[in-house]
């Protein structure tokens, strides 16, 4: 069960943080609406968490070699961690009057979560810590940047 927890937690954490930050930036840039961003976060926290949990479930079944119980534990841990790491980003939006400031706070929270997790993961696996953190945060910045520009394009086309 420990391996299932690690798989589900690590996948849910990374996907929950990166996907939600990208979604937030894209939706905020295209709509400038707190309601749209909150609705999007809640939707992705449920729909994407269920979808990713099913993806982990199916890919683990396809890879074979695991007991059904372990597959279900991976599925559950993926859903719970993805849901929790996505839904946490509603808090800065609710507590901050400015959507822009809420996005900055959310980005900082996301970078800290991923940075600390990357540090501990690299240390545990005895790999280069700086490279691991740079790789993970680099992908996060790429997703946020692309989401920003996609939101701008959507805003320019449809407003």
Image (tube, rainbow, N blue to C red):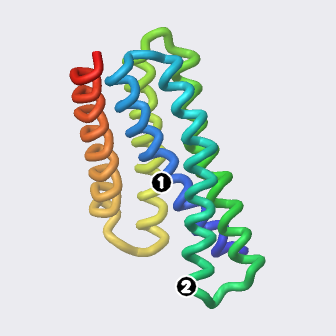
Front one among 13 and 133: 13
Q: Where does the image place residue 1, in percent across and percent down from the top left?
A: 72, 74
Disc 1 is placed on an element classified as: helix
For marks 1 and 2, the one nearer the N-term is 1
The numbered dot on residue 36 is none
Front one among 19 and 140: 19
Q: Where does the image place residue 105, in percent across and percent down from the top left?
A: 43, 26
Q: Residue furthest top?
A: 97
Q: Which residue is mark 2?
A: 63
Quadrant where the C terminus is found in the figure: top left
Q: Is residue 36 left or right of residue 130?
A: right
Residue at x 49%, y 22% (from the top left corner): 36
Vertical placement of 133 versus 67: above or below? Answer: above
Q: What is the crowding at mark 1: few (fewer than 14 residues within 10 Å), some, or many (at least 20)? A: many
Q: Which residue is mark 1?
A: 14
Q: Is residue 145 left or right of residue 129?
A: left
Q: Residue furthest bottom?
A: 65
Q: Where does the image place residue 35, in percent across and percent down from the top left?
A: 53, 18
Front one among 56 and 117: 56
Mark 1 vs mark 2, CA separation in Å: 22 Å
Residues at marks 1 and 2 touching, judged by CB atoms closer than 8 Å: no
Disc 2 is placed on an element classified as: helix
Residue at x 73%, y 84% (from the top left corner): 67
Tell which tag, 1 or 2, sits nearer the viewer. 2
Q: What is the crowding at mark 2: few (fewer than 14 residues within 10 Å), some, or many (at least 20)? A: few
Q: Where does the image place residue 134, in percent across and percent down from the top left?
A: 28, 55
Residue at x 40%, y 42% (from the top left corner): 111
């Amino acid at each position: 069960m420990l391996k299932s927890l690690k798989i589900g937690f690590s996948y849910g954490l990374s996907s929950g943080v990166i996907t939600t930050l990208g979604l937030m930036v894209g939706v905020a840039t295209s709509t400038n609406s707190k309601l749209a961003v909150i609705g999007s976060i809640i939707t992705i926290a449920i729909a994407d968490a269920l979808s990713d949990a099913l993806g982990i479930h199916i890919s683990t079944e396809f890879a074979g070699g695991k007991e059904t119980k372990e597959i279900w534990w991976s599925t559950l841990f993926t859903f719970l961690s993805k849901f929790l790491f996505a839904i946490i980003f509603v808090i800065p939006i609710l507590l901050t009057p400015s959507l822009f400031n809420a996005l900055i706070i959310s980005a900082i929270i996301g970078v800290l979560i991923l940075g600390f997790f990357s540090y501990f993961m690299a240390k545990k696996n005895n790999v280069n810590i700086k490279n691991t953190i740079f790789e993970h945060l680099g992908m996060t910045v790429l997703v946020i940047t692309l989401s920003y520009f996609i939101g701008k394009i959507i805003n320019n086309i449809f407003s």
